Amino acid sequence: MSLYHAKSALSGLWKEKWIYLLSTLSMAVGLFVMSVGFVAVYNMHILARELPEKFSMTVYLKDGLSADDMNRLKGAIGADRLVSKVTYISKDDALDELRKSLKGSENLLDGLDNNPLPASFEVKLKRKSVEPASVGQLAKEIRSMQGVDDIQYGQEFLDQIQKIVRIVQTSGLTFLAALLAGVLFVCYTSVKILFYRKADEVETLKLLGATGWFIRVPFLLEGVAIGVLGGAGALAASFAFFKVFIARFGASMPVLANMAVPSVMLAALPLAGLFIGFTGALIALGRIRF
Amino acid sequence: MIRFENVSKIYDKHPALKGITFLAGKGEMLFITGPSGAGKSTLLKLIYHAVEPDEGTITIAGQGTSTIRAGQIPYLRRMIGVVFQDFRLLTRRTVFENTALALRIRGLGDQEIKNSVMETLKLVGLRHKSDVYPESLSGGEQQRVVIARALVAEPMLLLADEPTGNLDQDTSMEILRIFKDINARGTTVLIATHNTALYAGSSKRVLRLEEGALAREDLG
């Protein structure tokens, strides 16, 4: 690439400024919608990763376990990579807990000859280290351990959340891929149109002995310019949108207040624009025939 | 420099050239003549590989054009300066930039380009119009810009397709003088024309085409 190519691209941009403006705006809108979609998918991903910490599992133990069995079981559960803490709750502690929860009606328990409540482990999971699917697998493994009577956790809730997350992520990624194809197409058609508008010039260059790359470079630079400017526009629009959106609805919808907007990834929008612009232009130009 | 062996070209079932065989030596000046539609332009286009022959072989400076790879075509064309019949000037570029194109594609530096272009524009008498756009020039001046662009890179071979097509007699003779000067410096020159005044009394070879066939060869 030489100064000549840069000048040629700049001159091309200026002479066809309305086509470029429209293409850049289309690119900016496409990338902006992509960034909103990306933030939604990104937040779903974070939610899915953080879900397990909201849950604790209660592992009910069979009666009559020895202290050694208890410790072995506790050690086995605690050794799992997903588990952060295992707390033992004895039969007496469980009854006390029940008594506290029945405050004012404690006499309901007076008629009991013996304590019917089982001892249990409260199992806390590690933060940001497990997927909902792994939680189910862990429960299955614990349930199969000797001395475990039953296990309870928000299985249905987790399954539902997992399904929703999967649907949102899949449809979000499909949506993003479709938008990417759309934005790529905008760049492709813009460069194609501009190439045709300069068909005579291109033909003359070819007959004078220009190589394919000599002809392509100004168009590639023009494609890159559309991409980078479109990306910069999308970046500005995204920051403005999220600032207004969160400020306006964050108070009434706590989910929005906690929404993560990955600034570094948004800042990469002009770079994404550059890549898309370059690729679109490259496809549009194809093979130069002599 | 140029070797045609039994070359034929057919456009939509209509033969444009039929079994053409001729040889043009290095440093020679040669005229191709004949009525409109005789195949003069097609013959030149075959040399700079704008079209390909349907039969026969063409060799330019030892390079067979039918076996050339697509990536090599630009380099073949750089050996050849072409004065196109339809000029092919870029209307949005000045006389200087139009002439400089032939050097820009060769990747020369700005200063070198400036020196060569100004020298060539001086040769064709257009140095004072280097900043003018082609549309502001007369037909003869535009023709001279095309000649300047064809010459600026000092090609081994110069092809001119009806270079005096719409010009008056004085301008035509002025342009012929430029071609003779270039030829005297060692460049092979091939001129397709139906202007007999260009070659009359020149003692140069004149190939006459009629209905796509080589009808005869004379000395001008």
Image: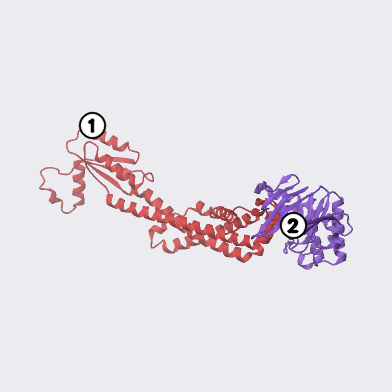
Chain colours: A red, B purple
Chain letter for the residue marked with disc 1 in the picture: A
Q: Position of residue A14 (x, y in %)?
A: 66, 63
Query: How far is disc 2 from disc 1 in space, using C-alphas?
Result: 109 Å
Instruction: Tell me the residue that label 1 is attached to.
Output: A68
Q: Amino acid at mark 1?
A: Asp
Query: Residue A16 is drawn in which quadrant?
Result: bottom right
Residue at 61% in and 66% down: A18
Q: Position of residue A74 (x, y in %)?
A: 27, 36
Q: Amino acid at mark 2?
A: Ala
Residue at 86% in and 59% down: B199
- Marks 2/1 in contact by CB < 8 Å: the verdict is no
Q: Position of residue A182 (x, y in %)?
A: 50, 59
Label 1: how many residues lie within 10 Å, few (<14), some (14-19) or many (20+)?
A: few
Residue at 88% in and 54% down: B203
Label 2: how many residues lie within 10 Å, few (<14), some (14-19) or many (20+)?
A: some
The reply to whether residue B100 is visible in this rendering is yes
Residue situated furthest top in the rendering: A68
Chain letter for the residue marked with disc 2 in the picture: B
The secondary structure type at the circle numbered 1 is helix
Instruction: Tell me the residue that label 2 is attached to.
Output: B213
Residue situated furthest right in the rendering: B201
Residue at 38% in and 52% down: A47
